[in-house]
Amino acid sequence: MTIKLSIAFDSLFRQRAAEIERTGYPEVQINVVWSAPGAESERVMENEFKGLLPFVLHDAINHIGRIYLTQTVIKTGGTPRVRRFWNFSIDAIKEALINAIFHQSYEEPTPVEVQVTRREISILSFPGPDPSIRMEDVQAGRAVSLPHRNHRIGEILKELDLAEGRSTGIPKMLEAVRKNGSPVPIFESDERRTWFLVRLPVHEQTCPGPGESETVEIST
């Protein structure tokens, strides 16, 4: 499964790869870890994406979509109507990763950690939201826009048509899971706001496990 992030991003990636390498974009790192319950080791499979911001976002999001996303198709017996949904919303994953890259610390860079299991995908980044923002407002998508700690990163993401810079990332994440019929994401942080965790639960009616089967049809 190849994910089209945006027209601007895909155009940049195809036509300006060499220019991107000369532009001086910051380096970032995203680690994607697949864990299977009951395994001897929790770290069953790990992929590391490290390099210039546009390439890392592109490669990590497409890797997650290609390896871990599966579609379920429910067919109603005797009618042509079908209902389709994904185990996880790729648009929600994209927004969560963009948010993590946007707001992470570049003074003490720490990799963004993506943990994939059959039950959820979690995205952990450092630090957390500004202490003046209540987690209740984050959960409701009502986060107040404050001066960004990474203005240049925001400009880069806007240039790639990946962010608007108006605190729209979490509302767009909530809308993405709603459209897919997935449970509401869970947002967590500690009191000192040293970390931020986004948990995306699996769709409750998902049949295949990540990477097992692209489409499952069910007659009801």
Image (cartoon, rainbow, N blue to C red):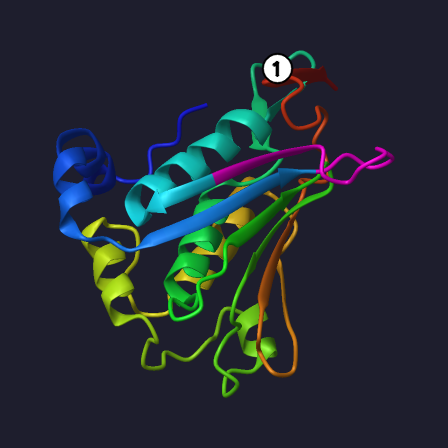
Q: Residue at x 70, y 31 (%)?
A: 206
Q: How many numbered callouts?
A: 1
On the image, numbered disc 1 is attached to which residue?
79
Where is residue 115 drawn, in percent x and y?
A: 64, 45
Q: Is residue 45 magenta?
A: yes
Which residue is more in the foreground, 53 or 210?
53
Residue occupying the point 60% across, 77% down: 136
Image coordinates of residue 128 in percent, x first then y, are: 53, 72
Q: Where does the image place residue 52, in percent across and percent down from the top left?
A: 30, 46
Quarter in which the C terminus is drawn: top right
Tell me if residue 64 is in the magenta stretch: no
Of 11 and 164, nearer the camera is 11
**Res. 107 image quadrant:** bottom left
Classify residue 204 as left or right of residue 166: right
- Magenta-colored span: 35-48
Residue 87 appears at what percent x and percent y? 62, 34
Seen at 62% across and 40% down, the residue is: 33
How crowded is the residue under tag 1: few (<14 C-alpha within 10 Å), some, or many (20+)?
few
Left of 136 or right of it: where is 63? left
Question: Is 107 located above or below residue 11 in the figure?
Answer: below
